[in-house]
Image (tube, grey):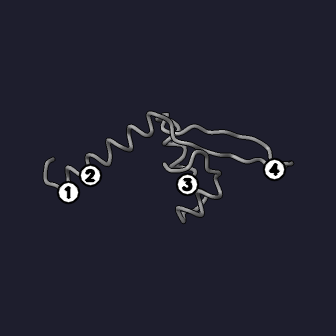
Amino acid sequence: MVNDWMDFNSLKDLLDVTDGNLSSHITALEKLDYIEIRKEFVGKRPKTSYRVTQDGRKAFQDHLGALENLLNGLT
């Protein structure tokens, strides 16, 4: 949420997950329009980057609010 765009390998390293695990989560987030995907070439190598959409930010904020309510016993 704090970075504009992040590439696949940087996300994988940051989250300490496998390629397959990250790929399945990215697919789910993309289907919900929570992330935007940009594919480009750097030299001859493909580079895929991601950033959160407005819908994604709202869903994240809603999730945080629900967690706060749960922790405060307001569910």
User: As shown in the figure, which amino acid type bears the numbered disc 1?
Assistant: Leu
SS label for mark 3: helix
**For residue 17, side relative to residue 55 (left or right):** right
Q: Around disc 4, counting alpha carbons within 10 Å, would you say few (fewer than 14), some (14 to 19), or many (20 or more)?
A: few
Q: Position of residue 19 (x, y in %)?
A: 61, 58
3D distance between C-alphas at marks 3 and 1:
28 Å
User: Which tag, 3 or 1, sits closer to the chain's start?
Assistant: 3
What kind of element bears circle 4?
Answer: strand
| Residue type of the residue flagged with mark 3 | Leu
The answer to whether the residue labelled 2 contacts the one labelled 3, judged by CB atoms less than 8 Å apart, is no
Identify the residue shown where x is 20% and y is 52%: 70
Q: Label 3 to label 4, Cα distance in Å? A: 20 Å
**Measured from the top left, where is residue 54 in percent x and y?**
46, 34
Query: Mark 4 sits on what residue?
Result: 45
- Looking at the rendered image, the disc whose residue lies closer to the viewer, 4 or 1, is 1
Dot label at residue 71: 1
Q: Looking at the picture, does residue 13 appear above or below residue 65? A: below
Q: Earlier in the sequence, mark 2 or mark 4?
A: 4
Question: Who's the residue at 27% across and 46% down the image?
Answer: 65
Residue at position x 13%, y 53% in the image: 73
Image x and y of residue 61, in percent: 35, 43
Q: Amino acid at mark 2?
A: Leu
Among the two numbered marks 2 and 3 on one chain, the one whose residue lies closer to the N terminus? 3
Q: Which residue is mark 2?
A: 67
